[in-house]
Amino acid sequence: MRSLRTVGAVALAVVAVTSSASAQRARRAPSSSSSSSSTSTLWEIGADAGLGFTLAVPSGDRKVTSLSVPLQSIRAGFFINQDWSLEPSLGYSYTKIEGVDGISLLQLGFAGLYHLTPDRTHRQVYVRPFLGFLSASSGGNSNSDEQLGVGVGMKWPKLNGRMAWRGEVNIDHTFDAEVTALNLLFGISFFTR
C-alpha cells in the first residue's frame, strides 16, 4: 500500500508541474490555430527495449530483474497539440523454462506524453503518466492485472526531427500482484512528417 501511495504522490506532482508549465507557456506565446491544426496529423511510431527491477514484492515472492532486448513494446503516439501526445502501446513476451509450461504475457498500455519543449528538432524532455493492462497465461490458466506508473524521459532528434532516440526512467505499480518496479527504457521513434 505504501508503494501505491508513492506512485500516486508522484503522479499528482507530475500533473501539478505539467499544468503549471503549460499555463506559463500559454501566457508567454500567442496561440496560433494554424500550428495546432498542423500538429494534429503528426504521428510518432516507435519501439522500446527495457530493463526492469522489482522494488517491492509481496512477502515470500522473489525480486526479479528483467531485460527485454531488442523489443519490449511497440507504440504509436498521436500528437493532439505541440505539448501533448497520446500513446497506446503493445507488448508480448513468451518465456519457456525446461520442464515448466510456457508463460505468455500480453501488455496493452496507454500513456499521455507532456513535452516540456514543443520543438522536436531539439532535445525534448517529457513526462509520461501511463496505465497498463496485463494478461498472463500458462498451462491453461490465465490472470489479468492493471498497472499505473509515471516516467520521465528525453528524446534526441536526428534527421531534422524525422527520427529520435528516446530514453526514459519510470516507476510502476501492478495492483493485484502488489509489485512495484523501476524500469529503464531505450527506444527509437519515427515521425510521419
Image (tube, grey):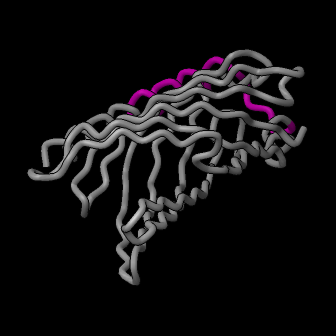
Provide the major secondary structure of the magenta segment: helix
Is 133 placed above or below 183 here? below
Which range is magenta?
Answer: 15-34
Q: Position of residue 109 (x, y in %)?
A: 52, 56
Apparent side of residue 100 relative to residue 152 in the rendered image (left or right)? left
Q: Position of residue 149 (x, y in %)?
A: 38, 44
Count of marks overlaid on the render: 0
Along the line of sight, the residue nearer the viewer: 20 or 125: 125
Which residue appears farthest toward the front when viewing the image?
Answer: 99
Q: Residue at x 31, y 34 (%)?
A: 10
Apparent side of residue 41 relative to residue 136 in the rendered image (left or right)? right
Quadrant in the picture for residue 65:
top left
Along the line of sight, the residue nearer the viewer: 13 or 138: 138
Residue 177 shows up from this direction: yes
Along the line of sight, the residue nearer the viewer: 71 or 29: 71
Is 51 placed above or below 28 here? below
> Does the magenta segment cover residue 154?
no
Is 69 placed above or below 76 here? above
Is 60 placed above or below 27 here? below
Quadrant in the picture for residue 46:
top right
Q: Residue at x 17, y 52 (%)?
A: 61
Q: Residue at x 39, y 79 (%)?
A: 139
Q: Position of residue 40 (x, y in %)?
A: 79, 47
